Image (spheres, rainbow, N blue to C red):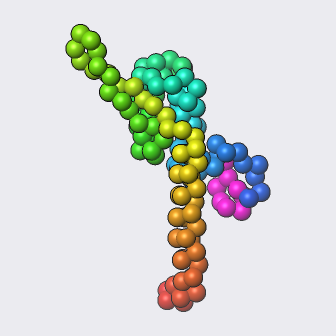
């Protein structure tokens, strides 16, 4: 993945690259999200099986996705008592809007910094 904006502009970036960059995700997080979309709600244990990873690794990825707002968990009751969690991916159209909003916020922040560039540069 490119490490600077000029590199990104020259590189052959994919949607996943952009999503990782903008939302601060890792490759495993993208794979986790895609698996949830493909298979529907599931436990961290089942997700780990599908990803070929330990449950704890799948759980860490789920926590990253929850923090980013791409996944939420639902509590399911067990008939003999107790409960468990299933994890659900939000729809891609919602992710697209999150990315768009984040990029817009970044653009406005960078634009404000550019406006003050010469003043800040001379003040140092």
Left or right of 32: which side holds 8?
Answer: right
Residue 65, above or below 102: above
Q: Position of residue 101 (x, y in %)?
A: 54, 58
Q: Residue furthest top?
A: 80
- Asked whether residue 57 is in view, the answer is no
Quadrant of the image occupied by residue 113:
bottom right
Which residue is drawn at the image coordinates 51% and 25% (left, top)?
40
- Asked whether residue 7 is in view, the answer is yes
Left or right of 40: which side holds 1?
Answer: right
- The magenta region covers 1-8
Query: Is residue 9 on the magenta stretch?
Result: no
Quadrant of the image occupied by residue 87:
top left
Give the camera-side residue of 36 and 50: 36
Which residue is drawn at the image coordinates 45% and 31% (left, top)?
88
Which residue is drawn at the image coordinates 77% and 57% (left, top)?
10
Residue 26, above or below 100: above
Q: Position of residue 67 (x, y in %)?
A: 41, 44
Quadrant of the image occupied by residue 108:
bottom right
Residue 122, above or below 58: below
Give the camera-side residue of 105 and 91: 91
Query: Is residue 6 on the magenta stretch?
Result: yes
Q: Position of residue 81 (x, y in %)?
A: 22, 14
Give the camera-side residue of 110 and 101: 101
């Amino acid at each position: 993945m490119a490490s600077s904006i000029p590199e990104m502009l020259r590189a052959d970036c994919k949607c996943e690259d952009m999503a990782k960059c903008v939302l601060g995700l890792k490759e495993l997080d993208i794979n986790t999200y895609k698996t949830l979309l493909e298979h529907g709600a599931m436990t961290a244990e089942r997700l780990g099986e599908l990803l070929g990873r330990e449950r704890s690794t799948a759980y860490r990825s789920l926590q990253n996705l929850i923090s980013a707002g791409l996944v939420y968990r639902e509590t399911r009751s067990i008939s003999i008592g107790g409960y468990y969690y299933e994890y659900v991916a939000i729809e891609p159209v919602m992710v697209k809007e999150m990315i768009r909003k984040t990029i817009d916020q970044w653009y406005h922040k960078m634009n404000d910094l550019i406006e003050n560039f010469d003043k800040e540069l001379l003040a140092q």
